[in-house]
Image (spheres, rainbow, N blue to C red):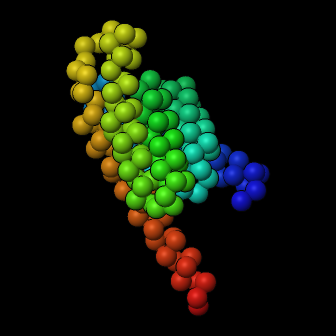
Amino acid sequence: MRKTHKLTLTAMLIAIGTLTSNLLFIPIGVTKVFPIQHFLNVLSAVVLGPFYAVAQALCVSILRNIMGTGSIFAFPGSMIGALLAGLFFMKTKKIYMAFTGEVVGTGIIGAILCYPIATLLLGQKAALFGFIPLFIFSSIAGALIGAIILTLFLKKQVASLYS
């Protein structure tokens, strides 16, 4: 895929992520659970690679915060999840590893990194592992949708090659 195609697809995914942030989110405590972001992370990690996946996650997080539909917690979770999804897929070429990278990156590492943001920057009391259940739920839901859709598309693409 040429660089122009990658940039265009990244921009389209950013637009989808930004638009759906107004429609599909679950407010839980100080965070907003947004499974579409995890779907987009897996999709961009597999189709575009880790660099474009992180760029997409960063841009969606910035735009969601500017529009008031996101929180500061969107940054560590979405970007680390996108990076690990892209790196795991790049290393193994397995969709389930992109799923795993997204869940580990967002659901565990990103959730733990939200603790200092909550306590130091926002001055709110938070448990060190308090964000993990919320982030795990959201990342599993979204990443599973992404993995299923990618698997179906790849099967369809392989089937059309032999038709």
Going by the image, does 74 lie left or right of 123? right
Q: Position of residue 16 (x, y in %)?
A: 55, 48
Whether residue 63 appears in this view of the structure is yes
x and y, in percent, of residue 120 in the image: 37, 10
Of residues 89 and 32, the one nearer the viewer is 89
Q: Is residue 72 left or right of residue 130?
A: right
Residue 84 image point, x, y percent? 47, 43
19 to 65, vertically: above or below: below
Q: Pinpoint residue 54: horizontal percent, then vertical percent.
A: 56, 39
**Above or below, comparing residue 60 to residue 154 in the picture:** above
Q: Quadrant of the C terminus?
A: bottom right
Name which quarter of the figure residue 149 lies in: bottom left
Q: Residue at x 61, y 84 (%)?
A: 161
In the foreground, 35 or 90: 90
Residue located at (60% from left, 38% from top): 55
Q: Is residue 97 above or below residue 150?
A: above
Residue 76 found in image quarter:
top left
Residue 15 visible in rendering: no
Which residue is pictured at 33% across the width and 27% down the height?
112
Instruction: Tell me if residue 8 comes above or below residue 63 in the rendering.
Output: below
